[in-house]
């Protein structure tokens, strides 16, 4: 693989940053230590501008190229937050914070973008500016939206933006990408059922909210099976259910909740409509009431055509074109880089990290062998997007 030689020289240093971040995971917007470390490193490298507090706790740094006459500004994004999971790897650099760990590789994403920053500030072999985006709260907090809403794109003049995510189960030294919908929208619903409580020995005197909730749970599974066109994609998962505290009491209320994932706006609209109708009508048929709180969170990650082709070409330069899959199937997981792609053209790509534990698993750890590949991808993307005239 044509890894950038200078990046290979300090890969061990980047890995040390990554392991330090891994030892000190922080959740959502509370990434104060991580953001401070990032800002300190960026200033140390000699970035031309380092701004903290973007989107609450995000960091954006600007590196000017050797020339800036092109007027182009390319954004590169990494996420910084961890997950509320207890780590079980037993590694020397395992989390020192009980109940939190970097189980999705954001420590690696942050370290790789820092490595690219170090290289780009040293060489500045491009004509334009690069905005290095370090984002908080990807894991459910919509930090990407917060940064966009904070005026990041306009403030730093970002014209196009790129993101990268490690992917367990994909061979190290491979990339995957696609045009259009790359990852699904991620929505949340909570259904509150109100029945009529009573004594468990006298069910005929009550309206059992638990039974009603159970029936709603079953009926919701018909929405994808019988309302969504079989050639389209949708996921509905009920993941929580709560009712009652005593063995001899039929509870007055019950709640259930879960998530909906789709790849198209029309299917997203259909799912919201049918979840609400099924819950309300099933409850009514059983003599109860159901109130649905349906919240739309992350939109679909939609890759833009020209930027997707460009990202694939750059990946091919790093790992060879044969190791870049350009038509990978979409993933039904969500990703708030979607908000940045709504604001500016760009592309999101997966980088294989080999046969490791899956993301969001307590045994997961980022594969440091991916570091020189990811850093080289970022470096070549900037230099190729904004070449210096020869």
Image (spheres, helix red, strand yellow):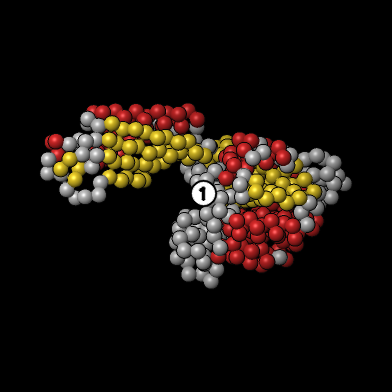
Q: Nearer the viewer, residue 48 or 12?
A: 48
Local secondary structure at mark 1 = loop
Please provide percent x and percent y for residue 5: 74, 62
Location of the N terminus by quadrant is: bottom right
Q: Does residue 12 sit above or below 341 in this rendering?
A: below
Query: For the point 25% across and 49% down, which residue is it?
Result: 245
Residue 253 at x, y = what percent? 27, 39
Crowd class of label 1 (few under 14; some 14 to 19; many from 20; radius 10 Å)? many
x, y percentage for residue 224? 37, 34
User: In this orientation, does residue 198 appear?
Assistant: yes
**385 shown above or below 342:** below
Residue at 57 percent of width and 45 percent of height: 143
Instruction: Name the residue tied to disc 1.
Output: 139
Q: Which quadrant of the structure image shows residue 47?
A: bottom right
Q: Which residue is drawn at the image coordinates 56% and 53% (left, top)?
A: 30
Quadrant of the rendered image containing residue 352: bottom right
């Amino acid at each position: 693989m044509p890894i950038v030689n200078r990046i290979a020289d300090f890969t061990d240093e980047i890995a040390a940053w990554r392991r330090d971040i891994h030892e000190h995971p922080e959740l959502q917007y509370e990434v104060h230590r991580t953001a401070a470390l990032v800002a300190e490193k960026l200033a140390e490298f000699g970035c031309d501008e380092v701004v903290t507090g973007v989107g609450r706790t995000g960091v954006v740094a600007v590196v000017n190229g050797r020339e800036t006459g092109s007027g182009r500004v390319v954004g590169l994004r990494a996420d910084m937050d961890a997950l509320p999971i207890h780590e079980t790897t037993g590694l020397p650099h395992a989390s020192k914070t009980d109940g939190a760990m970097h189980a999705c590789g954001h420590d690696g994403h942050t370290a790789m973008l820092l490595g690219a920053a170090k290289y780009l500030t040293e060489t500045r072999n491009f004509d334009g500016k690069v905005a290095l985006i370090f984002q908080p709260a990807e894991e459910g907090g919509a930090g990407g939206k917060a940064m966009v809403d904070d005026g990041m794109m306009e403030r730093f003049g970002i014209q196009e933006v790129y993101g990268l995510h490690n992917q367990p189960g994909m061979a190290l030294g491979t990339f995957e990408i696609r045009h259009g919908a790359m990852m699904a929208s991620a929505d949340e619903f909570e259904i509150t059922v109100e029945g009529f409580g009573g004594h468990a020995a006298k069910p005929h005197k009550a309206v059992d909210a638990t039974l009603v909730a159970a029936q709603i749970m079953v009926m919701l599974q018909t929405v994808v099976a019988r309302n969504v066109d079989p050639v389209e994609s949708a996921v509905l998962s009920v993941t929580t259910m709560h009712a009652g505290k005593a063995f001899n009491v039929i509870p007055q209320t019950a709640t259930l909740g879960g998530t909906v994932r789709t790849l198209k706006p029309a299917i997203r609209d259909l799912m919201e409509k049918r979840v609400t109708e099924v819950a309300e009508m099933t409850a009514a048929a059983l003599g109860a009431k159901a109130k649905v709180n349906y919240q739309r969170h992350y939109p679909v990650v939609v890759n833009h055509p020209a930027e997707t082709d460009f990202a694939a070409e750059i990946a091919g330069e790093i790992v060879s074109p044969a190791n870049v899959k350009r038509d990978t199937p979409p993933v039904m997981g969500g990703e708030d880089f979607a908000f940045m792609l709504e604001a500016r053209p760009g592309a999101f790509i997966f980088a294989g990290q080999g046969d490791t534990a899956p993301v969001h698993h307590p045994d997961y750890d980022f594969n440091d062998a991916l570091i020189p590949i990811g850093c080289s991808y970022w470096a070549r993307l900037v230099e190729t997007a904004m070449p210096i005239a020869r």
